[in-house]
Image (tube, grey):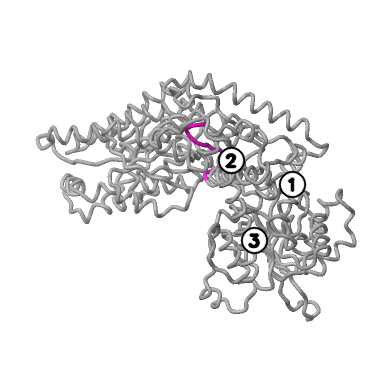
Amino acid sequence: MQVKTYKYVDYLWDEAVAQKLGNDQVELFLYRSNILGADLRITNYGGGNTSCKTLEKDPLTNEEVEVMWIKGSGGDIGTLDRAGIAGLYTDRLRNLKNVYGGLDDEDRMVGLFNHCIYDLDSRAPSIDTPLHGLLPFKHIDHLHPDALIAVAAAKDSEKVTKEIWGDTMGWVPWQRPGFDLGLQLEKCLNDNPGIRGIVLGSHGLFTWGDTSHECYLNSLEVIEMASEHIAKKIAEKGNVFGGAKVTSLPAAERSRKAAQLMPLLRGLCSSEKPMIGHFTDSDVVMEYINSRDLERLAPMGTSCPDHFLRTKIQPLVLDLDRDEDLSSTQGVLEKLRPAFERYRQEYKDYYETCKRANSPAMRDPNPVIIIYPGVGMFSFAKNKQTTRVASEFYINAINVMRGAEAITEYTSLPRQEAFDIEYWLLEEAKLQRMPKEKPLSRKVALVTGAGGGIGKAIADKLAAEGANVVLTDIAEDRLREALETYGRDTASHAVCDVTDMASIGEAFRKACLDFGGVDIVVHSAGLAISKALEDTTEADWNLLQNVLVKGQFELAKQGVAVMRSQGLGGNLVSIASKNGLVSGPNNVGYGTAKAAQQHMARLLAAELGKDKIRVNVVNPDGVIVGSKIWEGDWAEGRAKAYGITVDELPAHYAKRNLLNEIIYPEDIANGVFACVGVLDKTTGNIINVDGGMANAFVR
């Protein structure tokens, strides 16, 4: 039990950290949970459950009572903290056996868990609560390791369990989680005293220990033994999936093809609600999707409930040749549409065949996992985290299939059992408790000039309102610094020179590969040159035209191509300037370019309305604080034009607008959000964010 060297799992227990936690068993249980959740071979995001039991003083009787602390509903053991757990009186939970009315009484029992609450700050108890509470052990892990689910999903699983662990492990056949499954675990332990854990058929693993560390070691060793057994079987069998039927394209070609295809897939997957995409072509994925057995295994679906709740019961396998020419959007869509229509109809048939009298309404029938042999695997869901996690869970399912096929033969849950989990009223209640989506959820925004200043403020605002953002800038160091300010699954970046057509193309390919497409394009990249006519050089003129005007044109052209392939509409927003409307001294090059941006937006609005692509302009003025263009010669030029010093510019600009307000980058960001997130029936418009400049009024 004290062996700390493992080949198939990571031993992450740090005794120095544990000692700092002292004898606080709850903190040690949380520590164990977090390091278990850090290894995706042990359990994936949101999967599994952990618990501990402690003696506490009852606030009502002042007597010592046993309390079980357990991960609450919807939590994740990898990030679990005290706010995510429930504390229940163990004896009250066990006394529920006296009122349990059998399998038809399962849903009512979940409501009774609340009558067992000890800690009033508890998270809602999960359906797994009785599985832990009816077992006597101080520390318990319920995990979904790929290796254990492979054993659980293998034909003759009970026999395989005995082959690996002898009499030291119990086995319980598949049953939906709930109070009765807790009773079955209790019975298994009573029938097999001295066992170290229990394998749940088609589901996962229960292990335990007297201390948090002993429980952790027990879990790792049991998983290690299963992994060793599977590795031996794979070595003996050789080609577990029957060998390769398709050869993978080179990695660079796979990425190029995936980026080209993703907007089309995204549009097809978004027939009910827009979706965000994810792509992976890891070795594990490619071995499976290129195999001869894909045709047999993919329709069988996943076995573990945690898997198919996130991936749907089965994937969509594309009937596209590996070397398919994807250059004709309409031609490819004509090939793809029948497959999607067929998938949706099959899902509807599954729902109609399996539904109960009280089943929730059918959910989105579109696929979550899409497989393209030779290229890779796509997933689509409501946000980046959900789609990434779905991809991870399907990779878990691939590992399970490989292991089960190596041991004996992979088996999946019967469709009715799968449906009863997917459309369980308790799962529906969990979905209904999810936070309301933000205004720009399910949207992808590409923002130029986002390494700082106005562009970064715009990206921040769009991300805060729920969008995924692709930051682009000509300076990679600024981009990397900016990217660090966002959480995981929110933003990505691409170095982009808006004067270079190819560079813009790479930025859009990055957006498509990272998130599935683009819905919002904001051209904020810019520079300012303030010179009199005689001082304005041809180089000055060309630079302004290339960055501001040509850049906007090429961004619109390539962005619209992506939006049209998705068929979801979209938004183009140009950050222009009050100077495009107002005549002023020493401003011929900059003012002309800004005016061109404004009129281009009007022209595009007139052309793209039929595609539901809206085009609007935000006009800043006097954004001195936090704006990149004021760090150079522009400030000196404007100060000279007005006969004041550079230090006097902020006060000068604030005093000259009607509201006497200083304009900040965040104010411009609010203007962009109004265009894309509030004014959903506005196009061809110009919004001035300048504190009120009468000579810039557009009407």
Residue numbers of the magenta segment = 373-384
Q: CA distance from mark 1 to mark 3?
A: 19 Å
Quarter of the image containing the C terminus?
top left
Does residue 182 belong to the magenta stretch?
Answer: no
Does residue 377 belong to the magenta stretch?
Answer: yes
Please state which amino acid type lies under the numbered disc 2: Val
Q: Residue beneath label 3, please?
A: 222
State the count of labels. Answer: 3
Task: Please name the residue shown 68% across and 50% down the image.
Answer: 151
Please state which amino acid type lies under the numbered disc 1: Asp
Disc 2 element = loop
Q: CA distance from mark 2 to mark 3?
A: 23 Å
Give 643 or 620, whichever is nearer the viewer.
Answer: 620
- In the displayed orientation, state which residue is furthest to the front: 236
Place of residue 285 in the rendered image (x, y in percent of width and height, measured from the top left): 52, 40
Crowding near the residue tagged with mark 3, few <14, some 14–19, many ≥20 C-alpha atoms within 10 Å: many
User: Which quadrant of the view contains residue 556?
Assistant: top left
In primary-sequence order, the first of circles 2 and 3 is: 3
Place of residue 260 in the rendered image (x, y in percent of width and height, measured from the top left): 43, 30
Q: Residue beneath label 2, please?
A: 240
Disc 1 element = loop
Q: Residue beneath label 1, please?
A: 156
In primary-sequence order, the first of circles 1 and 3 is: 1
Crowding near the residue tagged with mark 2, few <14, some 14–19, many ≥20 C-alpha atoms within 10 Å: many
Task: Please name the residue shown 59% across and 51% down the image.
Answer: 232
User: In the rendered image of this protein, does residue 448 appear above or below residue 148?
Assistant: above
Disc 3 element = helix
